[in-house]
Image (cartoon, rainbow, N blue to C red):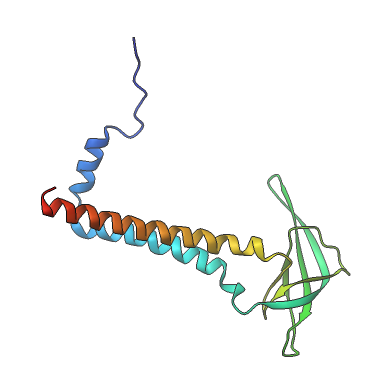
């Protein structure tokens, strides 16, 4: 006696039929909306990376934050930009910083970080989303073209 695995959302053929019965504007607008959201979020998260430059960070204060099981330190400090202006703001770091530390990092007029790798992860995720969307569109158009040719 073989048992069938439970189907969480019902029969896939029924689901496809329900999706195909939606109005055309919904079938087009929903994927486009999801794509825009998936691209806009990483762009928003990496917006502060535009115009960063190598700076020496002076850590002025750090607050210990407990969020669930993670323990993070939110630090503030100052750094001098290439044009001579002194900027102050939050400093993100992979390691622990203590007030009075002087470390190398990257900063702009608003924020600074000690690790660009962590800051670039959202941008890489956004690139993968765009790549997947382009591949999906190309595949969809290719399948539609083949169906029209009668293959």
Q: Is residue 38 above or below residue 19?
A: below
Is residue 30 visible from the viewing direction of this image? Answer: no
Figure label count: 0
Q: Is 29 on the left or on the right of 103, as rendered?
A: left
Which residue occupies the extreme top position in the image?
1
Residue beneath the point at 23% across and 46% down? 19
Which residue occupies the extreme right position in the image?
100
Q: Position of residue 42 (x, y in %)?
A: 51, 64
Q: Is 33 on the left or on the right of 119, as rendered?
A: left
Is residue 108 visible from the viewing direction of this image? Answer: yes
Q: Nearer the viewer, residue 21 or 134?
A: 134
Q: Position of residue 88 (x, y in %)?
A: 74, 78
Which residue occupies the extreme bottom position in the image?
83
Instruction: Tell me where residue 52 sits by quadrant.
Output: bottom right
Q: Is 126 on the left or on the right of 66, as rendered?
A: left
Residue beneath the point at 52% across and 69% down? 44
Q: Nearer the viewer, residue 46 or 140?
A: 140
Q: Position of residue 129 (x, y in %)?
A: 44, 58
Q: Nearer the viewer, residue 33 or 66?
A: 33
Instruction: Tell me where residue 90 sits by quadrant.
Output: bottom right
Quadrant the N terminus occupies: top left
Q: Is residue 77 above or below residue 133?
A: below
Q: Is residue 111 above or below residue 138?
A: below
Residue beneath the point at 26% across and 32% down? 11
Residue beneath the point at 19% across and 57% down? 24
Instruction: Tell me where residue 51 sits by quadrant.
Output: bottom right
């Amino acid at each position: 006696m073989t048992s069938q695995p439970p189907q969480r959302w019902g029969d896939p053929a029924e689901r496809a039929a329900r999706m195909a019965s939606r109005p055309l504007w919904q079938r087009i607008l929903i994927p486009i909306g999801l794509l825009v959201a998936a691209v806009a979020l990483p762009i928003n998260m990496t917006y502060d990376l535009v115009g960063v430059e190598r700076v020496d960070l002076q850590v002025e204060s750090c607050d210990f934050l407990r969020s669930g099981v993670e323990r993070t330190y939110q630090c503030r400090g100052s750094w001098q930009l290439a044009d001579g202006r002194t900027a102050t703001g939050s400093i993100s770091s992979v390691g622990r910083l203590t007030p009075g530390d002087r470390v190398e990092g990257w900063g702009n007029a608003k924020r600074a970080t000690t690790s660009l790798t962590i800051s670039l992860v959202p941008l890489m995720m956004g690139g993968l989303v765009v790549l997947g969307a382009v591949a999906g569109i190309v595949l969809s158009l290719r399948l539609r073209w083949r169906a029209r040719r009668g293959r």
